[in-house]
Amino acid sequence: MKLPAADSFVYDVIVVGGGPIGTMAARYAKLNGISHVLVIEENASIGSPVECTGLLSAAALRETDMEPNPSFVFNSVKGADVYPPNGHCLKIEGKEVKAYVVSRKMFDRQLAEKAAKEGAEFQLKTQAVDLKRETVCGNEIWALGVFAGGNLKTLYTKIIIAADGVRSRTARLAGLKPCEKVLSGIQIEAVYHSNDTDFVEMFVGSAAPGFFGWAVPVNENISRIGLAVDLDAAAKQNKKNGSDDTKSAYDYLSELLQSPILSQKTAGGNTDFVVGGIPIGPMKKTYAAGLMVVGDAAGQCKPISGGGIYTGAVAAKIAADVASEAILENDFSEKKMSLYEKRWKKELGRELDIGMAAHAYRMKLEDKEMNDIFETLNDPEILSLITEHGDMDHPSVLIRKLMLSKHSLKMMKLAGTFFKTVL
Ligand SMILES: Cc1cc2nc3c(=O)[nH]c(=O)nc-3n(C[C@H](O)[C@H](O)[C@H](O)COP(=O)(O)OP(=O)(O)OC[C@H]3O[C@@H](n4cnc5c(N)ncnc54)[C@H](O)[C@@H]3O)c2cc1C
């Protein structure tokens, strides 16, 4: 990489990755008054390909400043029908709309449009491939090597916000260590006769080791059916069953589709196919001098549900705040950037830690124990606590309520070691 010429243009912020979290960071950087903000995106189109179920909590829409409307919302849901391995459905009802089923393509595009309206620049078909620290007139800046239009070019910037998703090359180039785990996700969109489009269906237990399967209704005739697995839990399960082969997420989805509950509602075939990783257990360090890592790139997905939009949006705003403070103070030091991590951990750290504890607990459960848990939860008083306090983004609120209720002994018996981490 060549040294920057004296008259090279230096951006204030370059966001690598034009996903929802990158464009949120860019928009807030502009709203905070930063002059030159550029988003680079390796694909030719924002919002495509989609690697998501598009089930966004009401809080995720609020956090991204998106009013639910038919331009991107297909359906809204109030609760879940959860199927443990024995197939005895537990209906969990919310009092109001808990989440929206969206077109991620349209959602991502509208977020990008909002960023562009605030003055963020976009360069599509531009892939970050190299990263170096350079000194210009005594100031350290980033020289970002990009592959664009068949050419290698260098872009210069004071700050990089790495929002390049689960396989973040930018974080790797900056020498940062990856997140703890990446779950293997897979999904189809297919003809599916939903009993009630107000409810998503969830399938827990050995059907999806370490995580769960889902059928999320887009409308009464179409659902997004998928699952994610923790491949460590899958390997353990296979070994226990006397097999050395590790089944893939694809194998588990094929089996789920043939299960009695799903097979009677599907017509076969699919109109969309998604595979993708869900990063959980955030990176130990999410910053370097002049650089912050946000969203999936930082492993900020919720370990209990796999959702990454709410948490990523919270982190993106914090990164934009720290970027604007750094520009004002002309301070791009590692110490300054560490404020980003301190602040996002204050907002999200506890829920993500509890989520990882829940994940570790879920990994150990046998099908019989899973059935027992759902039998215990099938109590009108417990279900009413779930209806009252269930929150996709803050599960600790419900856990605390359960532990402080008269059912605490039952809860401790079920999952004492996990619940202790919450109190
Ligand atoms: C199967 C599945 C289902 C999911 N369902 C949900 C759900 O229902 N609800 C929810 O909240 N979350 C869900 N998630 C998680 C959610 O999709 C992510 O958390 C979210 O997309 C993260 O946004 P992001 O902007 O951080 O990363 P991404 O959306 O991955 O965006 C990163 C962008 O960076 C670009 N990029 C990558 N490398 C480079 C590079 N070197 N140079 C330039 N650009 C680059 C990519 O092309 C991409 O556009 C799901 C994930 C999976 C896999």
Image (cartoon, rainbow, N blue to C red):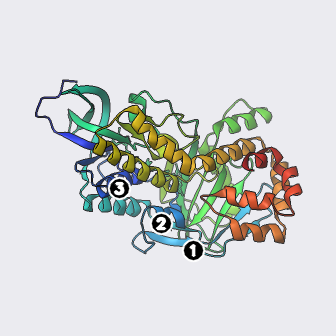
On the question of residue 169 being in view, the answer is: no
Marks 3 and 1, the one that precedes in the sequence: 3
Dot 3 crowding, Cα within 10 Å, few <14, some 14–19, many 20+? many
Dot 2 crowding, Cα within 10 Å, few <14, some 14–19, many 20+? few
The percent position of residue 2, horizontal first and vertical second, equals 19, 24
Q: Which mark is residue 28?
A: 3
Tell me the amino acid under the disc marked 3. Answer: Tyr
Q: Is residue 305 above or below residue 388?
A: above
Q: Which residue is mark 1?
A: 220
Tell me the amino acid under the disc marked 2. Answer: Arg
Please tell me whether mark 2 sits on a helix, a strand or a loop.
Answer: helix
Residue at screen point 88% across, 50% down: 413
Tell me the amino acid under the disc marked 1. Answer: Glu
Disc 1 CB within 8 Å of nearest ligand 1 atom: no
Q: Nearer the viewer, residue 273 or 229?
A: 229
| Displayed quadrant of residue 113 | bottom left
Disc 2 CB within 8 Å of nearest ligand 1 atom: no
Residue at screen point 25% across, 38% down: 157
- Left or right: 349, with 314 as reference point: right
Residue at screen point 50% across, 30% down: 177
Q: CA distance from mark 2 to mark 1?
A: 26 Å
Task: Choose mark 2 or mark 1, whichever is in front.
Answer: 2
Disc 3 CB within 8 Å of nearest ligand 1 atom: no
The percent position of residue 416, horizontal first and vertical second, equals 83, 47
Q: Which residue is mark 2?
A: 62
Residue most extreme to the left: 7
Please tell me whether mark 1 sits on a helix, a strand or a loop.
Answer: loop
| Displayed quadrant of residue 108 | bottom left
- Left or right: 168, with 33 as reference point: right
Task: Choose mark 3 or mark 2, whichever is in front.
Answer: 3
The percent position of residue 305, horizontal first and vertical second, equals 62, 54
